[in-house]
Image (cartoon, rainbow, N blue to C red):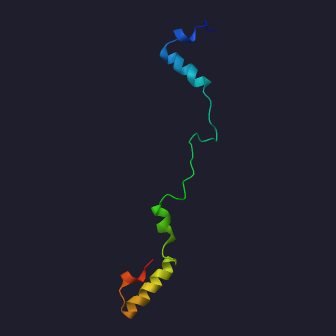
Amino acid sequence: MGKYISYEKMSKKQQKIVNASKRGSWGNVKPITKVKESAKVYNRKKQNSQGCGYSFVGAAFLGVLRRLEGVALADSCRC
């Protein structure tokens, strides 16, 4: 075993090794602060995910029917 050297007199490299050995692991804890988003804030993704009130398959079927009737496809989704 070597001589004891005070922390202040150690080289920066040795101090780094000592600091790393004292530091522990966070384990399963994530040290990121999480904040719940306000319901009042506009969220474009939330609006687009709701769609026009019917599923994509239903929208496609409705578009085919409107095309057959001669109505423009652009008018099929008026939300």
Could you say which is closer to the camera, residue 14 or residue 7?
Answer: 7
Could you say which is closer to the camera, residue 20 or residue 54?
Answer: 54
Locate residue 2: give its quadrant: top right
Residue 77 falls left or right of residue 15 = left
Residue 42 falls left or right of residue 75 = right
Which residue appears farthest toward the top when viewing the image?
3
Could you say which is closer to the camera, residue 56 or residue 17?
Answer: 56
| Residue 48: image location, x then y, percent | 46, 68
Quick check: 59 above or below 67? above
The mark total stands at 0
Locate residue 21: give its quadrant: top right
Residue at image position (43%, 90%) is 65
- Quadrant containing the C terminus is bottom left
- Quadrant containing the N terminus is top right
Residue at image position (58%, 9%) is 6
Quick check: 27 above or below 68? above
| Residue 67: image location, x then y, percent | 38, 89
Could you say which is closer to the camera, residue 56 or residue 3?
Answer: 56
Quick check: 39 above or below 7? below
Residue at image position (47%, 85%) is 61
| Residue 12: image location, x then y, percent | 48, 16
| Residue 24: image location, x then y, percent | 62, 30
Residue at image position (47%, 81%) is 59
